[in-house]
Image (tube, grey):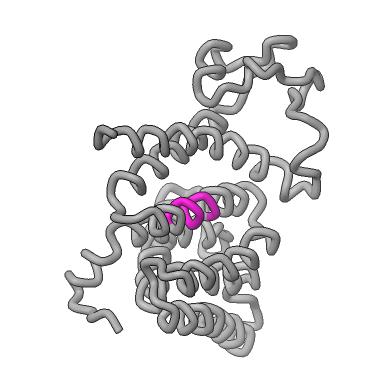
Amino acid sequence: MPAWFFPVLAANVGLVVGSFLNVVIHRLPRGESLSHPPSRCPRCGAAIRWYDNVPVLSYLFLAGRCRDCRAPISPRYPLVEAATGLLFFAAALKLPQWLWVFHAVVLGSLCLALALIDLEHMILPDALTLPGVALGLLFAWLGGPTPLLPAVIGTVLGAALPLSIIWAYRWLRGVEGMGLGDVKLLAMLGAFLGWQGMLLTLALGAVAGALVGVGLILLGKGSRQTELPFGTFLCAAAIVVLFWGEKLLTFWSWSQP
């Protein structure tokens, strides 16, 4: 097989997975079934035909509109599909063995879904984060890129840190510093990335959130009380750490356990 075959195959699988992630992102926070009814136009209710459900291409062929009522289709749909395809392609191209590839694409898919759900609804569903903790520990036990001990420490520390922040904010200011969804998300990231990767993710996410918050204040579109979807920043940071975490840790001279 030529060297490009498996990354290209993985990219096509990623496009299909991205189409399913769109269903998860839309339906899960609304409490709807992920399997029934089949995909429909939210405006006219017309069922989406199979040939209008081809990732990315259908959106382009339909010019971003429903075939029946011509209502606009959110560009989020092809963007999520393309991003998932790119994630799968990069994992298959970069990582040395299939278990590591599965580890990367599962974490990346969870992060994409959680990031967009938190961005729109300000929630991080347990239906994604809690199974994510179990999957991260399973990959570690099977011999994935994160050894089991750092994964266990990362899970415990990932939950303990935000719980401490919640307690401290409640005691000092009488408000919640973070939500419990962030606790479970950081535990999941600790299971997948280990304690060092989780801490690096937390640092990068906090910096990104602070920069966005300051930018909104300077633009007059926010204040110090404006709530930001911290889970979105954590998920974006986790994908960065997933692919470049080792180099970043080496840059800061953090040794692996």
Decide whether the magenta segment is chiefly helix, strand or loop: helix
In the image, residue 171 above or below residue 69: below
Give, as a single range, the part of the protein colored magenta: 104-110
In the rendered image, is residue 120 in sight?
A: yes
Residue at position x 36%, y 65% in the image: 204
Q: Is residue 22 left or right of residue 1?
A: right
Where is residue 92? Give x, y as percent: 35, 46
The picture quadrant where one finds residue 100 is bottom left
* Snapshot quadrant of residue 70: top right
Quarter location, residue 123: bottom right
Which image quarter is the C terminus in?
A: bottom left
- Residue at horizontal 36%, vertical 67%? 145
- Residue positioned 52% across, 62% down in the render: 230
Looking at the image, the residue that sits furthest to the front is 1
Q: Is residue 219 magenta?
A: no
Q: Is residue 159 above or below residue 64?
A: below
Percent x, y of residue 239 = 40, 55
What percent of the width, then of the height, locates residue 88?
Answer: 41, 43
Residue 190 visible in the displayed image:
no
In the rendered image, residue 34, in percent from the top left (x then y), is placed at 75, 43
Drawn side of residue 13 relative to residue 150, left or right: right
Q: Is residue 115 left or right of residue 251?
A: right
Query: Which of the pair 122/160 is nearer the observer?
Result: 160
Question: Would you place residue 256 above or below residue 66 in this image?
Answer: below
In front of the other: 218 or 34: 34
Total marks shown come to 0
167 or 49: nearer the viewer? 49
Q: Nearer the viewer, residue 147 or 163?
A: 147
Q: Is residue 48 above or below residue 173?
A: above
Q: Residue at x 59, y 74 (%)?
A: 183
Query: What quarter of the picture does the N terminus occupy?
Result: top left
